[in-house]
Image: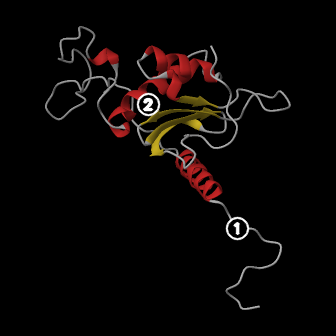
Amino acid sequence: MSRHSARPGRSRISARSRAGAALAAVILGLALAGCMATPVPDPSADPTGSGSPTNGPSTSPTGTAAPEPTLVPDGTAADNLPFFAAITASVWASEGRATGRAYVDALVAAGFDKAAMQVTRDHSTVGNPAESIQFSVRWGEECLIGQVGPATGDPVTVVVPVLAEGTCLVGQTRPIDW
């Protein structure tokens, strides 16, 4: 047998496995690096909504408060990442932080399409709270993905390509049937 031929007993890694491994590596890498996508603007910087900060430092070089992120329906996944990250951070700061439904409901209330979402389970197969929860919104040929939980630390949000199967998350997800 030449050194370039496959070894007996070893199977080829499927494209799905490679894509899943790549997604897991990206999310794990971001989690381990302690990255956080976009900070949520400080609402106390502009309590009147006038666009002029009343207290504290300016959040932009021009001296005016940066606008809060909003949904960009005709934009790209990257255009919508700041808004997705802000929603994720607000749920993470709430009592519902450990439930996937809280993230899905908040994203739907903000204008994201529920039919384009996936979410992992809140509990393990033996009933323990999940160490992390992932949720996603398919946006064209890309995915907005969030990951939260005690094993994650601060929330992580990223944009990644859609998997070959047309989904965003690898593995079994729970039905969003509410």
Above or below: residue 176 compared with residue 77: above
- 101 to the left or right of 86: right
Q: Is residue 155 visible?
A: no
Q: Is residue 105 visible?
A: yes
Q: Amino acid at mark 1?
A: Arg
**Residue 60, image x and y in percent?**
21, 32
Q: Amino acid at mark 2?
A: Ala
29 or 159: nearer the viewer: 159
Instruction: Give the CA separation, mark 2 to mark 1.
Output: 37 Å
On the image, numbered disc 1 is attached to which residue? 12
Q: Residue pushed farthest right?
A: 126
Q: Quadrant of the N terminus?
A: bottom right
The circle on residue 85 is 2
Q: Residue at x 34, y 22 (%)?
A: 42
Above or below: residue 106 compared with residue 58: above
Q: Residue pushed farthest bottom?
A: 2
Q: Residue at x 52, y 44 (%)?
A: 34
Above or below: residue 73 compared with residue 160: above
Q: Residues within 10 Å of mark 1 (few under 14, many from 20)?
A: few
- 53 to the left or right of 151: left
Q: Residue at x 62, y 13 (%)?
A: 178
Q: Residue pushed farthest left?
A: 62
